[in-house]
Image: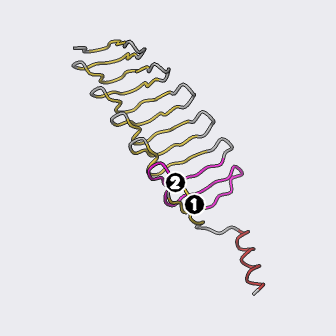
Amino acid sequence: MQDGYGIEEWPDGSKYEGNYIKGKKNGEGTYFWPDGSYYQGQWEENKINGYGTYYWIDGRKYEGDWINNNMHGKGRYIFNDGRIYEGDYYMDKKHGFGSYTWGDGKKYLGYWKNGKQDGEGKFVLSNGKSRKGYWEKGKRIKWLDFTEEDLIDQDKLTDSH
């Protein structure tokens, strides 16, 4: 059984470089998949566990906590088009509190459930203006605050009655 540092290669082009304990990947190591993607970080009992970074060949990257080969805990996911999610994960899905930033600078800061915006959050435009709202399953249900424009529109409605 492998014990200590080693390199293991498979016929499909997969490769592991790192630490073993009693024949299993444990501790720090890097695994390379045949498609060119790779993971660098902590292992436990042959599974990605602890802190590490996964790199996809299309430029995406996740850096953060893992449990049983799943993004789980705190992490930062950078998409290949400039979008960034930073926050909580539960079993590979955005879940808990997090911020999602689009490439143009717009941002959502708030709660997530099963990978979608869910609960209270704040939507921030690239110019810094923001609105608080409530989301369910990724869709905004209502705004929770009023802007000056809303008040002006409300005054217009009041004056016309």
The magenta region covers 106-131
Image-based side of 98 in relation to 131, left or right:
left
- The residue type indicated by label 1 comes to Arg
Question: Residue placed at 52% from the left, 31% from the top?
Answer: 61
In this rendering, the answer to whether 131 lies above or below 33 is below
* Residue 31 lies in the magenta-colored region: no
Image-based side of 136 in relation to 4, left or right:
right
Q: Which residue is mark 1?
A: 140
The image quadrant that residue 121 belongs to is bottom right
Give the image location of residue 79, x and y in percent: 57, 36
Question: Residue placed at 47% from the left, 48% from the top?
Answer: 115
Q: What numbered label is drawn on residue 117?
A: 2
Give the image location of residue 26, x and y in percent: 29, 24
In the picture, the quarter occupied by the C terminus is: bottom right
User: Badges 2 and 1: C-beta atoms under 8 Å apart?
Assistant: yes
Give the image location of residue 1, x and y in percent: 21, 14
- For this rendering, which residue is in front, 149 or 11? 11
Give the image location of residue 104, x and y in percent: 69, 43
The residue tagged with tag 1: helix, strand or loop? strand
In this rendering, the answer to whether 110 lies above or below 46 is below
